[in-house]
Image (cartoon, rainbow, N blue to C red):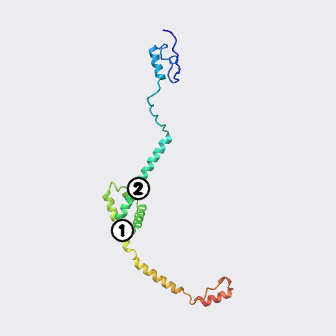
């Protein structure tokens, strides 16, 4: 054997060279060198494992923000469904608008924090929430009972309109005077004759 190393046609730049590696013995056996040669010259048939994506702080912040927004959308959707159910419960058989009942619920929640807390705890205390809704339903029914009859209101409106139209009719077909072209004396004369 000689002290010289075999020459490799295409050395792999990534492979450690025995002369450069401080831990490797200075002399390698032929068998080891041939194994190294085969490993360096054989094409890699095995696919390299996929590199994990680089995840930075910004990526994590975006993911957390998205999760928070999704949680808020889900909570808002559940709250909207709960409000719709509460409107149905409060309204019952009353012939009133859903928006009126929803407005009553919103006003109640904004004025009375206990009502809002009962709404928020509706899942853990469904019996208490049901009792609150029944009480609000009774209040709404009492208010609806006091509201004016729509037919009576329409009749009164029609009578008022008829009286007004009769009172504002002019006593003839003469056109209205042009006040802008009247002198002060003409206007006073017209005023004295026409305004009673």
Against 193, is 54 above or below?
A: above
Q: Residue at x 36, y 73 (%)?
A: 145
Considering every residue shown, the one lying at the far left of the view is 127
Give the number of the disc on residue 113: none
Q: Quadrant of residue 88?
A: bottom left
Q: Position of residue 169 (x, y in %)?
A: 54, 87
- Say which residue label 1 marks: 139
Measured in 3D between alpha carbons, the distance from the residue under mark 2 to the one under mark 1, in whole angstroms, is 27 Å
Against 7, is 150 above or below?
A: below
Residue 179 appears in the rendering = yes
Q: Residue at x 40, y 55 (%)?
A: 77
- Say which residue label 2 marks: 77
Q: Position of residue 96 (x, y in %)?
A: 38, 70
Horizontal side, residue 137 vs residue 44: left or right: left
Name the secondary structure under disc 2.
helix
Q: Are marks 2 and 1 in contact (CB under 8 Å)?
A: no
Front residue of this view, candidates 47 and 182: 47
Residue 136 appears in the rendering = no
Name the secondary structure under disc 1.
helix
Q: Position of residue 116 (x, y in %)?
A: 39, 58
Horizontal side, residue 20 vs residue 150: left or right: right
Front residue of this view, candidates 41 and 21: 41
Against 123, is 180 above or below?
A: below
Q: How many marks?
A: 2
Q: Work out which quarter of the rendered image holds the C terminus and state it.
A: bottom right
Pointer 2 or 1: first along the chain: 2
Q: Residue at x 62, y 90 (%)?
A: 192
Considering every residue shown, the one lying at the far top of the view is 1
Q: Position of residue 48 (x, y in %)?
A: 45, 31
């Amino acid at each position: 054997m000689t002290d010289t190393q075999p020459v490799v046609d295409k050395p792999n730049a990534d492979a450690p060279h025995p002369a450069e590696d401080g831990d490797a013995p200075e002399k390698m056996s032929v068998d080891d060198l041939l194994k190294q040669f085969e490993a360096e010259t054989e094409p890699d048939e095995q696919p390299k494992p996929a590199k994990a994506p680089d995840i930075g702080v910004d990526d994590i912040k975006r993911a957390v923000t998205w999760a928070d927004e999704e949680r808020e959308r889900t909570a808002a959707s559940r709250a909207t469904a709960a409000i719709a159910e509460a409107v149905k419960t409060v309204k019952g058989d009353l012939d009133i608008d859903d928006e009126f009942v929803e407005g009553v619920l919103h006003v109640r929640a904004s004025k009375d924090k206990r009502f809002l807390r009962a709404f928020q705890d509706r899942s853990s205390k469904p019996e208490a929430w049901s009792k609150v809704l029944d009480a609000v339903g009774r209040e709404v029914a009492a208010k609806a009972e006091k509201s004016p009859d729509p037919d009576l209101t329409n009749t009164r409106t029609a009578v008022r309109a008829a009286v007004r139209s009769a009172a504002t009719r002019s006593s003839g077909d003469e056109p209205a005077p042009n006040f802008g072209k009247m002198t002060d004396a003409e206007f006073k004369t017209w005023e004295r004759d026409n305004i009673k």
